[in-house]
Amino acid sequence: MRATVGIVWIVGLGAGCHNSCQALCLRMASYAEECGFVVSDAELDQCLSDLSSPDRQTRQTCGDFGSPDTLRSEWTCEALGSYWGDGATDDAR
């Protein structure tokens, strides 16, 4: 999955096809994997789909919380595990 997130991240940003909320989905998935969780392709696809057309306020919120430093200060690994369905790897359990 790590390679998939990386590929989606590079292709998506290179093509400019992700809004700030979809970019946040990708950052959160990457951070969750750093925490030892597995984010399935289906979970990531759902997040990207759910946030494909956010309203202005949601886009602003995503932008406010989208930096890696802010993401890490606002979300613990435990919270990310809950958000992504607790897809813990064998090493993280």
Image (cartoon, grey):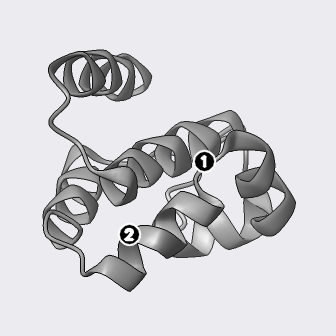
Q: Amino acid at mark 2?
A: Arg
Q: Nearer the viewer, residue 41 or 59?
A: 59
Circle on res. 79: none
Up-down relation of residue 10 to residue 92 (above or below): above
Image quadrant assignment for residue 70: bottom right
**Residue where numbered disc 1 is placed:** 32
**Residue where numbered disc 2 is placed:** 59
| Place of residue 40 in the rendered image (x, y in percent of width and height, measured from the top left) | 31, 48
Residue 85 visible, this orientation: no
| Residue plotted at (86% across, 59% down) | 73
| Residue plotted at (18% across, 54% down) | 42
| Residue plotted at (69% across, 41% down) | 68
| Place of residue 45 in the rendered image (x, y in percent of width and height, measured from the top left) | 18, 53
- Mark 1 residue element: helix
Query: Which residue is situated farthest in the right direction here?
Result: 73
Q: Nearer the viewer, residue 25 or 76?
A: 25
Q: Mark 2 or mark 1, which is nearer the start of the sequence?
A: 1
Residue 44 relative to residue 35: left or right: left
| Residue plotted at (52% across, 59% down) | 63
Residue 21 visible, this orientation: yes
| Place of residue 85 in the rendered image (x, y in percent of width and height, measured from the top left) | 46, 70
Q: Amino acid at mark 1?
A: Ala
Q: Nearer the viewer, residue 60 or 1?
A: 60
Position of the N terminus, as image quadrant, is top left
